[in-house]
Image: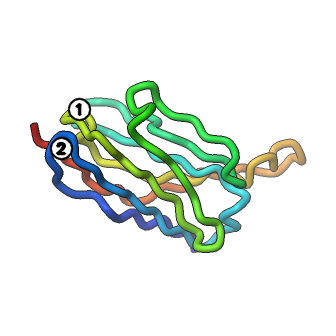
Amino acid sequence: QVQLVESGGGLVQAGGSLRLSCAASGFTFSRYRMSWYRQAPGKERELVAAISGGGGGRNYADSVKGRFTISRDNAKNTVYLQMNSLKPEDTAVHYCNAHGPVGSRNYGMNEYDYWGQGTQVTVSS
């Protein structure tokens, strides 16, 4: 059974930091691209950051570049999002996403998307 369990959200003042964690189980973690998305009230869900299975490839939304860092520990089946210099506009529910096994479509097999339940991040001004 696939599980993605986020933790680390909370209330922080502008300029502060939070570290989100997403513990994964039920699939071969290293074969999945891991991402963080967020959804603010009344807005669509947006990609915040993504990291390849081996950790060598990362990409970020322009709005968080230089402030957020995504990382993963394949030995612990966990992905992290270090969020620094937080702004009120970062307030949202943050979701962990797993996509893969990456490359399976090249062999006629399915790739899947799994989601966590979300963790609230609130940044006060």
Q: Residue at x 10, y 37 (%)?
A: 125
**Residue 10: % across, % down:** 21, 57
Q: CA distance from mark 1 to mark 2?
A: 8 Å
Q: Which residue is mark 1?
A: 89
Q: What kind of residue is marked 1?
A: Glu
Q: Is residue 34 left or right of residue 117?
A: right
Q: Nearer the viewer, residue 85 or 115?
A: 85
Residue 32 in which image quadrant: bottom right
Q: Residue at x 61, y 40 (%)?
A: 58
Q: Nearer the viewer, residue 76 or 67?
A: 67
- Looking at the image, the residue that sits furthest to the left is 125
- Looking at the image, the residue that sits furthest to the right is 107
Q: What kind of residue is marked 2?
A: Val
Q: Residue at x 14, y 46 (%)?
A: 13
Q: Nearer the viewer, residue 27 or 12?
A: 12
Q: Which residue is mark 2?
A: 123
Q: Is residue 50 left or right of residue 125?
A: right
**Residue 14: % across, % down:** 17, 40
Residue 86 in which image quadrant: top left
Image height of 65 relative to 101, above or below? above
- Looking at the image, the residue that sits furthest to the top is 62
Q: Secondary structure at mark 2?
A: strand
**Residue 46: % across, % down:** 42, 34
**Residue 78: % across, % down:** 54, 66
Q: Would you say the residues marked 1 and 2 are in contact, meaning their CB atoms lie under 8 Å apart?
A: yes
Q: Secondary structure at mark 1?
A: helix
Q: Is residue 101 left or right of residue 7?
A: right
Looking at the image, is mark 1 or mark 2 earlier in the sequence? 1
Q: Is residue 63 left or right of residue 49?
A: left
